[in-house]
Amino acid sequence: MHSDSSAQAPLNPGLVFEMMQAHQRTAALKAAIDLDVFRAVGEGPGDVPSIARHCAASERGIRVLCDFLVIHGVLAKEDGHYRHTPTSAAFLDPASPACLASVAHFLGNPANHEPYLHLADIVRAGRTVLPGDGSVEPENPIWVQFAETMAPMMAPVAGPLAALALEGSAGPMRVLDIAAGHGLFGIAVLTQNPQARVTAVDWAAVLQVALRNARKAGVDDRYEMLPGSAFEVEFGGPYDAVLLTNFLHHFDKLTCVALLKKIHAALRPGGRVATLEFVPNEDRVSPPMSAGFSMTMLAATRAGDAYPLSEITAMYQEAGFSGVTAHPIPMSPQTVVVGRA
Amino acid sequence: MHSDSSAQAPLNPGLVFEMMQAHQRTAALKAAIDLDVFRAVGEGPGDVPSIARHCAASERGIRVLCDFLVIHGVLAKEDGHYRHTPTSAAFLDPASPACLASVAHFLGNPANHEPYLHLADIVRAGRTVLPGDGSVEPENPIWVQFAETMAPMMAPVAGPLAALALEGSAGPMRVLDIAAGHGLFGIAVLTQNPQARVTAVDWAAVLQVALRNARKAGVDDRYEMLPGSAFEVEFGGPYDAVLLTNFLHHFDKLTCVALLKKIHAALRPGGRVATLEFVPNEDRVSPPMSAGFSMTMLAATRAGDAYPLSEITAMYQEAGFSGVTAHPIPMSPQTVVVGRA
């Protein structure tokens, strides 16, 4: 992110000031989304008075907010008029099918920000200040919001993940989708293979969101649901493949291995598990987005982490999987790791 | 800050995610300062267990926090050991005389963060949600904290500013220091010219901080104080020079012009006013730090701004000043603007 990440970088007090004020960026992006600024800019003409009218906001506020968005790369300014950058046009204008704006409702949820007010305490204790298991407490309502809002961030990943799980198989098969959330991963399996059946595991309220999405995709006749904790429900099976998406990072290694053993037992011999994860390099400080995800897990969980490939591989092997392969997903900070039962 | 600030930049959904999570950087830097991480890294050997011991913190927490600081350029990592970058050694290690860590107490003060929880409302209304005049309400206690903690950020600026105000004058002279805060600017004048006398204006509680600093510098025998509002106290005079540091940005232009007229009247003919300000280019979106300061003023004041040079010059001229010159300060995002009575 910054050119200053090596000891050879020049002295830069601005970096300290910028970091102390970085919270403004989050607030500005969320305010702009809430005020519908990105739609107003997309519709043009992009001058302050017309954006202010569209957003029912003051001209002073809109001018300062839009300038701030330009400074941070999510708008452009020319002759006093604001317009989209390619990034804001694709990912922030609600007129774009790839718009990620809904994600701000989850990532900007005050419940998700609250631990950062106590980060020194969290570092001291080594675990979230949230009660119990933090974000993975049973039936935590944030996962309904996650399922409802985070789909746009996951949509580009669902196709490649399903393809890796299917391995070209077009015949009848059974797929278990653990922590199904919005359901997009299982739905992509059902879309790619019209003879596949999916069994989705998540909290009951979350599965209602997944079921709605399966109906919209016209695949709900092959969609079954197993409400409850992945650690407690009977998986049934045997399955040909198990999807384990954005789940392992919430837990310590022992817990992950126990779950992977349970998954192994539910797979037919030769079946595969496909994990979607933030997988940093072994140095744990690159690339920035996947490495930085460990901070989110420190703040929100008791013992979660962003595990490098060596650690995921070791957990897979301890649970009985072999032939572990890693597949970075293009245009995403995430990696699919496949193992074979 | 980002290479994506023009419409020619490539598509980058990561930029959106990064901005939504930017608040983590502020929390991480503040936690690291509170936990004394930067001193621990400076003392070595830089492995997780020894830093954790120094900080009385968990190894999991220290490892994730330090990795996060590496990702964002304020530590380096080599063979699993953390060490300083030039920036963190100079500006974050308490062993460095240029350490800026105390600044985090002001910039990280929850009272200063609170408006950002309501930024959409602020943009709608065009003014802070803080009561009255926001950060510039009479006797606001944040300015005592400002005076006590922000001096390290201003120290590199004080010498150049004083030199611009003195213009080589070594004889007896009187200087008015408005919004004196920590007092460093007036103190630099007194240090550079042993025949100068300074009169400092600020809230009474703030002036006690300035007076302590004047005593430390051994110049308090030439230091007078005028407690109260710069808009209300009698300046007296005539003065040879007036320092007006980080003050105009809190107010609208009419208010600034009224104050500049009052200053003009307190100066001898040919005397000068030296304003220290965040002065963005006329496009108001560059350079990033001075342009981005308008967001801080939107959030915290009724009508403040980061004024480009054309607007400061127009205010100066309306108040009767001429010969306006701008002097960017090296290693600082700020500019001194001098005008002549």
Image (cartoon, coloured by chain):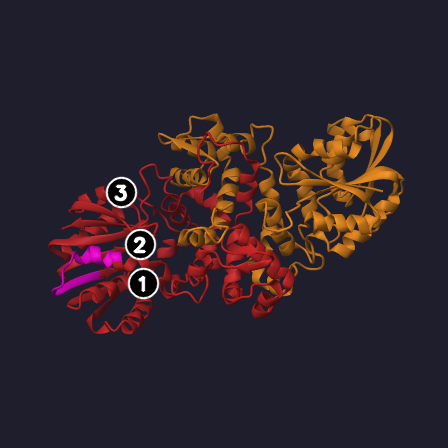
Chain colours: A red, B orange
Residue furthest left as drawn: A269
What chain is tagged by disc 3? A
**Mark 1 vs mark 3: in front:** 3
Horizontal side of B303 relative to A214 (left or right) equals: right
Judging by the rendered image, the residue that carries numbered circle 1 is A181
Q: Position of residue B213 (x, y in %)?
A: 73, 32
**Start-end of magenta stretch:** A160-176
Disc number at residue A118? none
Report the quarter where the N terminus of chain A lies.
top left
> Observer-nearest residue: A88 or B19?
A88
Q: Earlier in the sequence, mark 2 or mark 1?
A: 1
Residue B226 counted in the magenta span: no
Judging by the rendered image, the residue that carries numbered circle 3 is A309
The three-letter code of the residue at mark 2 reads Asn
Residue A175 counted in the magenta span: yes
Judging by the rendered image, the residue that carries numbered circle 2 is A246
Q: Quadrant of residue B97?
A: top right
Horizontal side of B252 relative to A60 (left or right) equals: right
